[in-house]
Amino acid sequence: MSKLLCPSMMCADFSSLEAEVAALDQAHVDIYHIDIMDGKFVPNFGMGLQDFEYIRKSTNKKVDVHLMVENPANHIDLFAEKGADIIYFHPEADIHPARTIDRIREKGVKPGIAINPGTSVAWFAPLLSIVDYVLVMTVNPGFAGQKYLEFVNDKITELDALKTSAGHDFTIVVDGAISPEKMAQLSKFGVEGFVLGTSALFGKSRSYKEMIKKLRSL
């Protein structure tokens, strides 16, 4: 199983963002992960539209958007038209999540749902047949540098088992305190995509190219 390595750009060095993107491109990352927060759905403000636009124009790699916002349907058209390849939203924040998924797909973008640690698989299971990605939050969303929540492992294994038994075709991605050790463990649970922050990629002494090569070998 090949890994999707997705640098979390809220952890990048914004004093030299152009150099950061160039180095990550040269390291052959797969998808740039952009967190958009409104200070309401989560108690923090994340990256902005201009950050997304800058990264989008600086790379030919895929770019995803993780909408940690209330009423995410209001923002689908904007980010789709700005060039997002994948849009994640939280069904917990959406009155009509199936309609929002349909809208994302209508815009030519891959739809994904992002799931909080406390949300059960049973709650969002009806949506699994119509999404391409499921982003499982392994920390409470909104802040970098948190501790991995071990109880989420049961949700991941349940999700993988349901994917197999029901014949669904979504990709499981994890986000939050993803260390190299967690990557090795979660790969065995059916996880294919990893959002990489300070636990595995940013703020280290080695080059991104060297670290990405090592992470792919796990």
Image (spheres, helix red, strand yellow):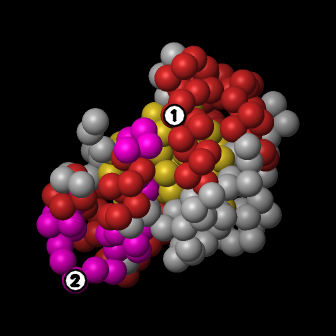
Nearer to me, 203 or 80 = 203
Nearer to me, 43 or 188 = 188
Circle 2: residue type = Ser
Percent position of residue 78, x then y:
61, 42
Which residues are the magenta region?
Answer: 188-212
Percent position of residue 45, x then y:
66, 70
Percent position of residue 131, x then y:
57, 27
Circle 1: residue type = Asp
Q: Is residue 28 magenta?
A: no
User: What residue occupies the far top of the structure in this picture?
Assistant: 167
Q: Are marks 2 and 1 in contact (CB under 8 Å)?
A: no
> Judging from the image, what secondary structure is the residue with disc 1 in?
helix
Disc assigned to residue 205: 2
Q: Residue at x 34, y 69 (%)?
A: 200
Q: Residue at x 63, y 58 (%)?
A: 151
| Residue picked out by circle 1 | 160
Percent position of residue 86, x then y:
49, 38
Residue 79 seen in the figure: no
Q: Quadrant of the C terminus?
A: bottom left
